[in-house]
Amino acid sequence: MDIRLLGVPEVWRGAAPLPLGTPKQQTALAVLVLHGGQLVTVDTLVDELWPDDPPRSALANVRTYVGNLRRTFDRHHGPNLVRLSGGYRLDVDDERVDVRRFEYLTGEAASAWSDGQHERVDELLGQGERLWRGPLVAGLRVGPVLTARRAALEEQRLAAIELRARLDVALGRTRAAIALLTDHVNSHPYREQAHALLASALKADGDAGGALAVIQRAESILIRQLGVEPGTELLSLRRSLLGRTAGHSPFAARKGGPERGGAVTSSARRVHPRHLPRNTADFIGRRELVERMLAEIGSSGDEAPTVRVIDGMAGSGKTLFALHLAHLLSDRYPDGQLFIDLRGHTEGAPVEPGDALTVLLRQLEVPAGRIPGDHKERAELWQRELQGRRVVLVLDNAVDGQQVRPILPAGPGSVVLVTSRRRLSVSDVGPAVSLPVMTSDEAIELLARTAGTERISKEPAAATEVARRCGHLPLAVRLAGGWLAHRPAWRVSDLARRLETGGSVLRQLAVEQQTVGGAFSASYEHLAEPARWLFRLVGLHPGDSFDARMAAALADLPLDRAERMLDDLLDQHLIEEVGPGRYRMHDLMRQYSAELLRESVDPARRREAGARLLDHALHRVAVRATSPDQQVLKAHLRLAAPHRIDLIDDADRSDIEWLEQERSSLIALIRFAQQEEHFTYAWRLARAMWRFFYMRGYFTDIVTTHLAGLTAAERSGDRVAQALMHNYLASAYTRTGSYLDSLRHLEMAVSISRDMGDRRNEQRYRANLVVVYWLSGSPERSVRLGRQLLREDSRGAVDSILSLPNLGYALIATGRYLDALQAHRQHLFLARCQGSWYHIANALGHLATVENLLGNHRKAIRLLLASIRLRGRTGHRFGEAEARNDLGIAYRHLRRYDEARVQHELALDLARDSSERHVQAAALNDLGLTLTAAGDAESAVSAHREALARASRIAHPYEQGRALAALADHLATTSTAEAGRYRQRALAIFERMGAPERHDLRRQLAEPSSPPT
């Protein structure tokens, strides 16, 4: 099995690609593969998958993604994905992973170059180049781990390109090197090494003029744009081309430049990096604060590093202030000026301290190969590199003190400037400097710098008003000035009036953020009215993101026109594109949109737009909600034709993963429908999503959405819908072990249906009571009800395909195995008659359960493997945990203990993923029995104790009794009295249930006890 992560992720088995699931699942795969053979903690996966704000279901989702990957690998004989305490480990062969091969090949090529093995270099680079299909996991949104790895691989690729060019020159292929390097330099103009290589190639090809032109361009970029002196290689090339000596460097006497003398030779001994972004020409104001901080830093002494934290509100100019200060300090700290954006308050995850250290060490020109993978060793190397240096370090956009502390220098001689929107808690650092907004004069001066001094000086009163409307906030002032600069026909007073009309925008926020709303308004007003209408409406969508079809439904526009308008909004930075054809709004922009909608749109039109969105969402869900009871779903939803049938694509029917992608947005839409009193859409959307939620084990989502649906049904007085919501709420409560809640909701559903004379639905809900009765410890009651329903089926009151499996389970619980076998065979017959693969898979699994109890374990294995394969083929994974556990039972009886243990643990993982606590208890009990049979008594006792605890928490008497009986067998060797007490407790449970296990317990308790040996 080959795993390809360079470019779009792919996994190939022979000549066939394997399905990798959702983008989140692909991201999880990449993290596991890149840490092959190592523990990847659940926390690491959560941070990578949701770098901004993990949802409450993050842990469950991670388990689902890993479980799906494990099943894919198991099905196709792929690498072993193991669950460990606290996380997971993927045992994958590095030879089968393109990233590992690329790293190995390029590393070996570099070594071969050092040894002068040119043919070997050519071969290794060729193999590596064929592996590169694009950046690491191209197209996926990634967190800190993959971001850092993506950057490191990109650096390795660029180094490989440059090595290829060196090789081409060495082998006389100068034209190939020139062509390669020309593209390379154009794409990466700040790579000094690339410029030097291109100049060398041109020189070797006899083009001295071209080589000099390349050097001059490199000098211009390095000096004027980065403020960095060219290195020794470029200087040597220039001298060799011009015949100059070292004493005639053109940089030695440059006006304003430092006196270099021996600087070139000393830089070869130790680098003096310059990585501060260019100092802005329009830095305005804060003179007193700048002078005070310079004085404080100057008087702080050299006994320890000087650290200053600069905080303030968003847009107050913290970064520009810190950079201005750092440039002023550069002469005092000549050994280096370093900068890193820690991304504490921007899109994506904050930079991890270890990743930040890697960036900073590379700025100090520490070779990538010397940077340790271990974070502690990396931090030690960072401190060693700073020893004896006087550097100024800017840590921009920090999220908290924990992110900053590992980066701070330990020794004296350096100054660190930290910026953050938060007040940071950093030990041994004085009080933070809180950056205030500008004064009126400073804000007007900044406006003049951005919009034009002459233009602003002609309208001083209007300029003062614009600055005031911007709250003297630098970000807002820059936005306003830039807007004027791009509209030369506008007067300043025109902009002042425009901002004044938007002064009420975002009034619920602080004043300074209202002024940012005024800046939003300047972009908004530039739109044509149809695009404004769309902008106002898309803020109605309550989800994380939306697509063009949803926008078209909201605004009732043709799809192609909506797409063009979305492009207009994107151009004005009023929305963001988060993926191909998918958009989102920043929170403040959404508030601004909502404010405009409330102010400018009649409530009735707003409600109509919301209804159009919900109608579209409901029909898009309905076409995908293929389920075993499709006809029942249609009867429940009672749907009319969609309002916009042109936006519903027949191809959507097979796109079940769309439901996964839109899951959080659809849940938000259900809440929106309930809150906005679109009651019929609220409960219909919940009902339409039920089968998807149930099959994927999202039982918490069922509870959330169906409670909202129940509230909507009650508010609208729709009794049929109320009964539906009660019934499907009960399904989630049953699977998660909340049997009392399940019983309460089912009884309400039955009562409502009976009152309405809805006989068919009443019987459906009573059939579900059969399951709850036996799970909660009343199997005889369950059997009686199940048989009564079958008798009523002869009169056409209820569908036997629903009642037979539930009756079969109840018969098993009371020890009537042959009767249960008959019930499940009838279920299988009906399933085949109806062509329902879902019911066929369930019936096969249920038959296997009975065959196991009858001792026909090989037959049970055949049935179970068929059931599991069928579930995998249809994508309906519901019930797979029980099937895996039954497979383990069969293997145990055949003394295949290792295989049995694997199946029990897989069942436990699946049950944890779906929060099915009763299945967890069963899997733990059966795992304990397998461990006992295999001779691992200590682990077995632990499994049974955990099973007892879980079964007790959900009041599941049958698994409680099994755990007590198993623990008694272990205690019998050490304490017969304690073992007897456990057996008495188990017997009391089984007697009350009428379970067949009571007979063995009676016999054991009747036998004379012997003292433990």
Image (cartoon, rainbow, N blue to C red):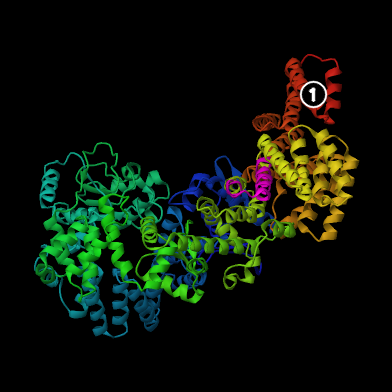
Task: Indicate left or right for 363 with 47 as reference.
Answer: left
Which stretch appears magenta?
711-734
User: Is residue 886 in sight in this rendering?
Assistant: no
Q: Residues within 10 Å of mark 1 (few under 14, many from 20)?
A: many
Residue 81 in percent (x, y) is at 62, 50
Q: Residue at x 85, y 31 (%)?
A: 996
Q: Quadrant of the N terminus?
A: bottom right
The quadrant in which residue 836 appears is bottom right
Magenta highlight on residue 717? yes
The amino acid type, in three-letter code, at marker 1 is Leu
Q: Residue at x 68, y 50 (%)?
A: 720
Task: Indicate left or right for 446 with 184 as reference.
Answer: left
Write down the residue under mark 1: 987
Residue 48 in percent (x, y) is at 47, 52
| Residue nearer the viewer, 2 or 116 | 2
User: Is residue 490 in sight in this rendering?
Assistant: yes
Instruction: From this view, report whether residue 975 is shown above or below residue 716.
Output: above
Magenta highlight on residue 451? no
Q: Residue at x 75, y 40 (%)?
A: 769
Residue 764 in percent (x, y) is at 77, 48
| Residue nearer the viewer, 34 or 840 | 840
* Label 1 secondary element: helix
- Provide the major secondary structure of the magenta segment: helix
Residue 479 in percent (x, y) is at 25, 64
| Residue nearer the viewer, 163 or 988 | 988
Q: Quadrant of the C terminus?
A: top right
The quadrant in which residue 467 appears is bottom left
Count of residue discs: 1
